[in-house]
Image (cartoon, coloured by chain):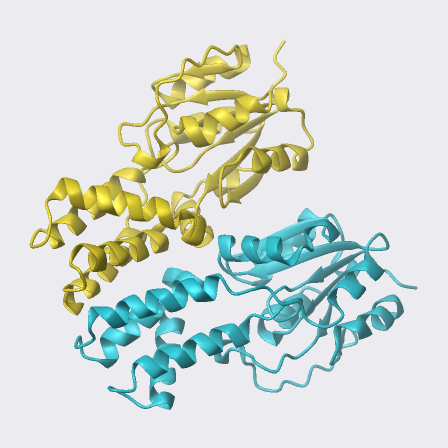
Chain colours: A yellow, B cyan
Amino acid sequence: MNNIKVICFDADDTLWINEPYYRDTEKQFTHLMTDYIDEKSCNDILLETEINNIKLYGYGAKSFVLSMIETALKISKHQIDSQTIEKILTLGRELINKPLQLLDGVEDVLKYFHGRYRLILATKGDLLDQERKLHKSGLESYFHHIEIMSEKAIANYKKLIAHLDVKPEEFVMIGNSVKSDILPVLELGAYAIHIPCETTWAHEHVENTQLDNQRFREIDNLLKTKEIIPAF
Amino acid sequence: MNNIKVICFDADDTLWINEPYYRDTEKQFTHLMTDYIDEKSCNDILLETEINNIKLYGYGAKSFVLSMIETALKISKHQIDSQTIEKILTLGRELINKPLQLLDGVEDVLKYFHGRYRLILATKGDLLDQERKLHKSGLESYFHHIEIMSEKAIANYKKLIAHLDVKPEEFVMIGNSVKSDILPVLELGAYAIHIPCETTWAHEHVENTQLDNQRFREIDNLLKTKEIIPAF
C-alpha cells in the first residue's frame, strides 16, 4: 500500500536549469582575471571565497557577485581596475535575468501527480531569486505550498513536514543534490529520489555514499517518478 | 466584542533597531566618497541606485552593498580605487554582523499577548538577514508562524491571511511603515496599528495621508497595543 501524501520537488536543476548558468558566469569571470591567474586557480579561489561567505551571505546570485568581487580584489592584490568591477556587476545582472528553461518532462510529471498528491516546492537560496524563477516558470499553480529555505538542513525539513501535518513516511523529496535533497530527508524517515544532474556545484558534492536504504531511489529522468512513487 | 485572533508584528524598527544601522553605514560610505562629491548628493545618488535596483536585487544588506559599489563607480567615473571597494565590502560585513537591539517593551508585549492570540512575524527583505536577526533576538518561540516576504504587497498579505485560515477582520498588523505595514492591510479589510520610528528610509516614506479609518490607530509606543487590541 502506498502511503505517500506529499511529493516535494527541489527546483534548481531538478525542475529547471540553474547550475550551468552559474558555471557560465564563472567562466566569464575567470576570463576577466587572465592577466593575474590561470583558470583553474581562479576557480579554486572563487569556490573557497564562496564557501567562506555562505554563513555571511547565504546562497544565490547576489552572494555570488559579492564573492566574485572579493575574489578579484584578492587575486589582483588590489590592482584590479574599476572597469572590471563594473563588468562583474554586469555579469551578475545577466545571471539574474537569464531566461528560465524547464528540464525534460517537468510539466508532464506535475500534471500527472497534480490532484493525486499534495505537491510542494522546496528550494534553498535567495528569496527574490527563487520567487522570480518560479514566476518565470509558470508552474506556481501546481504547488500547494512553496518553501524557500536559507539552508536545506534537517531542522528545516522537519519544520516543513510538521507544517504540512503529515508523517515523514508520507513525504517524498525529489532532487539533484544528495547533500541538500536526499540525506537530510532520509535521516528524518521520509522517502527520497535522487536525479543526478550533469553540472553539480563543488560545494554540493558528496562522495559516492552507498545509499542502501529502502526509502531511497536513484533515477536518470524525472519521468520515472510516475512509476516509482505509486509503488513506494 | 473583540474579534482579533492574529496579531502580526513587523520586525525591523518595530521589534528591533535596523534603519539607524543602515543610516550609519551610509554615513561611512559618503565619507569614503568625499574626494568626489558632497554628502547630500552622494546620499541622493545612492538612494536612486537602491530604488532602481529593488526589482533586481530586492531588500537587505547584500543589495545595499551592491548598490554602494555601483554608486561608487558612478560617482567616481570609474576612478575609485580597489581599496575603497574593499572598504565597502567591509562596511557590508559590519552591517550584517551588528548586534541585535530590541526596542522598548517588546518582550513585555509579546509575553502579554502570547497564548491569548496567535502571534505572527511578517518581515520583508533578505531571507538570511531576517533569519539571522530573529535568531539573535531570542524571540522565535513567541511566534506561531514567521513570514518573510520579498515585498509587503497586498497579494502577499492576502496569501498570509488565507494561510492562517482567518478573516481579514480577525487580523491586526503592527508596524512602523505606513507603506508596507499599514496601507496594504487596511485595503484588505484588516486592522493596522502604526508606530512611527524616528529613522525611516526615504523609500518607505509616504506623504501624511489622513488615515481616517475605524480599523486604524497610530501610537508612539508598542506597550500601548496592550490596551488597543483588546478594545478593537
Please, is residue A144 above or below residue B34 in the view? above
- Which corner quadrant of the image does residue B168 belong to? bottom right
* Residue B94 visible from this viewpoint: yes
B177 lies left or right of B117:
left
The spot of residue A140 in percent (x, y) is 49, 42
- Which corner quadrant of the image does residue A206 belong to? top left
- Which corner quadrant of the image does residue A91 belong to? bottom left
The spot of residue A33 in percent (x, y) is 13, 53
* Residue B66 visible from this viewpoint: no
Please, is residue A176 above or below residue A67 in the view? above
Looking at the rendered image, the quarter that the C terminus of chain B falls into is bottom right
Query: Image point 43% across, 49% down: which residue?
Result: A58
A142 lies left or right of B184:
left
Q: Among all residues in the image, which is located at the extreme right?
A: B1
Query: Image point 32% across, 69% down: which residue?
Result: B87
The spot of residue A73 in percent (x, y) is 22, 60
Query: Image point 36% across, 71% down: which residue?
Result: B52
Q: Which of A133 and B127 is in front in this view?
A: B127
Q: Which of B102 and B60 is in front in this view?
A: B102
Q: Which of A100 and A19 is in front in this view?
A: A19
Please, is residue B224 above or below residue A206 in the view? below
